[in-house]
Image (cartoon, helix red, strand yellow):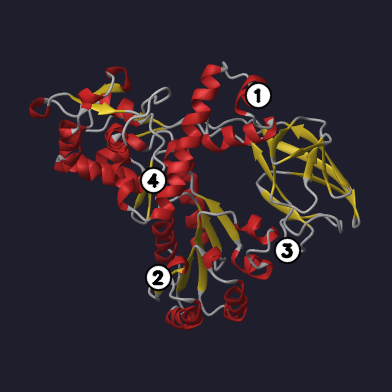
């Protein structure tokens, strides 16, 4: 039986106050939620300045302050005269976009909510969440389900974006109507894409149309989607791994289509950011074999990045239940590698005994054979080799960056100046990478 878990308290966002003057006059705004800002009239925060890009930057109030992120703008975003990609803005700072200066001050945040205790998760559709971040996602989507708003659900592979889209449909007034998913990256050759889309649009009438990875569609096809979306014969939900706003600024995604699908944007956090979800989800996936989830195993699994997120965790649990992962470890030539490159992981009590499971080894100074490198890989990565190459490559690069940064900051005692010098990176870019990977 799962023990009672204390949910992390929901830390309030700060409440930054912005003042600025642009072509439309003087403005003052207290920012309570994330907003996309730019010169486009449909932006959540409009800056009347011709030198500001249509989708120029994002303002994101977090507990540790206001974060500003440039969205690949034409003229850049500056904080106190320094060009940034992403930065936290201190009180009294000036954000410059185009020829417009925005001054930032801070009000008092709301008091934090008291932490609650619960044995049962919050559920939305067929998904469950124990963490505060997933409860917030579920609450937001449940509220949006009651509206006719288009929705962008953004998140890494394996976070359950399409399952969440289905849950929105099932909780909406369109629940009894068609639910049609278009895998844009898997559509046939360009000459047949328009025909395939036309068939999907017709099938979705009265229901919900899900566009997965719409950035993969040619620009000409994107243009053709505008009239049927304006007709509102169905609800549109987009699932994507990529920030479509940046693609708009790059000319790789049509602005008019973006604003038609961006009624609301919900980001699904990766599993590594959802404190409190990994253990109960694994226990759910193990079912009657929950005893396999020993404390020592769980401690090791919580250190992994889980780049494939919940999907990867489910595959891992299936392998653990069937014994495949145990056999993989048992048959590996572990004695061919220095024992310092491994850690003890107790897979289960009783007949399974204690096995050795490899971590990412330190290969500096050696050149092992390719076959030996394969045997050194952690078992949690095994499911990665069964997916499409594009997704595999993205996961692999992400994992490498995260591990590099973790070791870099450890070596330099978390000195940003020393780390940026050693890595040969600009400090602002290093900050962006550290925040991206949660290091």
Label whose residue precedes the other's in the sequence (2 or 3): 3
Residue 146 left/right relative to 162: right
Label whose residue precedes the other's in the sequence (3 or 4): 3
Q: Mark 3 and 1 residues: CB-CB less than 8 Å, in contact?
A: no
Label whose residue precedes the other's in the sequence (2 or 4): 2
Q: Secondary structure at mark 3?
A: loop
**Which numbered circle lies on residue 308?**
4
Q: Is residue 164 above or below residue 100?
A: below
- Residue 142 position within the rendered picture, expressed as x and y whole percent measured from the top left: 47, 56
Q: Mark 3 and 4 residues: CB-CB less than 8 Å, in contact?
A: no
Q: Is residue 267 visible?
A: yes
Residue at numbered disc 3: 42
Q: Residue at x 39, y 54 (%)?
A: 389
Nearest to viewer (mark 3 / mark 4)? 4
Label whose residue precedes the other's in the sequence (3 or 1): 3
Q: Mark 1 and 4 residues: CB-CB less than 8 Å, in contact?
A: no
Q: Is residue 270 above or below residue 145?
A: above
Alpha carbons under labels 1 and 4: distance apart: 32 Å
**Which numbered circle lies on residue 421?**
1
Residue at numbered disc 2: 175
Nearest to viewer (mark 1 / mark 4)? 1
Alpha carbons under labels 3 and 4: distance apart: 34 Å
For the residue carrying disc 3, how many other residues have a C-alpha within 10 Å: few (<14), some (14-19), or many (20+)?
Answer: some
Label whose residue precedes the other's in the sequence (1 or 4): 4
Alpha carbons under labels 2 and 4: distance apart: 29 Å
- Residue 189 position within the rendered picture, expressed as x and y whole percent measured from the top left: 46, 76
Near-viewer residue (20 or 377): 377
Q: Residue at x 52, y 65 (%)?
A: 216
């Amino acid at each position: 039986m799962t023990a009672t878990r204390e949910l992390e308290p929901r830390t309030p966002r700060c409440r930054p106050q912005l003042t600025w003057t642009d072509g439309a006059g003087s403005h003052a705004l207290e920012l309570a939620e994330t907003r996309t800002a730019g010169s486009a009239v449909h932006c959540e925060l409009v800056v009347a300045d011709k030198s500001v890009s249509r989708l120029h930057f994002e303002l994101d109030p977090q507990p540790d302050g206001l974060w500003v992120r440039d969205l690949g703008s034409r003229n850049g975003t500056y904080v106190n005269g320094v060009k940034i990609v992403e930065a936290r803005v201190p009180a009294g700072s000036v954000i410059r976009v185009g020829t417009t200066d925005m001054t930032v001050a801070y009000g008092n945040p709301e008091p934090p909510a008291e932490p609650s205790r619960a044995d049962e998760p919050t559920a939305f559709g067929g998904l469950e969440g124990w963490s505060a971040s997933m409860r917030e996602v579920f609450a937001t989507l449940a509220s949006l389900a009651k509206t006719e708003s288009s929705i962008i659900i953004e998140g890494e592979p394996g976070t359950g974006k399409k399952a969440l889209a289905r849950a929105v449909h099932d909780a909406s007034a369109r629940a009894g109507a068609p639910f049609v998913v278009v895998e844009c990256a898997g559509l046939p050759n360009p000459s047949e894409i328009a025909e395939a889309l036309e068939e999907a649009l017709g099938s979705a009438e009265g229901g919900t149309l899900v566009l997965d990875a719409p950035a993969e569609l040619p620009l000409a096809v994107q243009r053709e989607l505008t009239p049927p979306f304006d007709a509102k014969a169905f609800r549109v939900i987009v699932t994507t791994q990529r920030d479509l706003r940046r693609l708009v600024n790059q000319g790789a995604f049509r602005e008019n289509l973006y604003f038609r699908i961006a009624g609301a944007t919900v980001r699904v956090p990766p599993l590594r950011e959802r404190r409190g979800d990994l253990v109960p989800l694994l226990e759910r996936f193990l079912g009657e074999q929950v005893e396999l989830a020993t404390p020592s195993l769980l401690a090791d699994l919580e250190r992994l990045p889980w780049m494939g997120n919940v999907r990867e965790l489910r595959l891992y649990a299936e392998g653990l239940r069937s014994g495949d992962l145990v056999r993989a470890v048992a048959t590996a030539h572990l004695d061919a590698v220095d024992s310092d490159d491994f850690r003890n992981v107790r897979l289960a009590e009783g007949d399974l005994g204690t096995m050795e499971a490899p971590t990412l080894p330190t290969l500096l100074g050696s050149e092992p054979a390719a076959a030996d490198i394969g045997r050194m890989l952690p078992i949690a990565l095994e499911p990665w080799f069964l997916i499409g190459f594009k997704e595999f490559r993205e996961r692999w690069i992400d994992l490498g960056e995260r591990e590099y940064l973790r070791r870099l900051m450890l070596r330099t005692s978390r000195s940003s100046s020393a780390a940026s010098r050693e890595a040969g990176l600009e400090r602002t870019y290093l900050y962006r990478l550290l925040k991206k990977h949660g290091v």
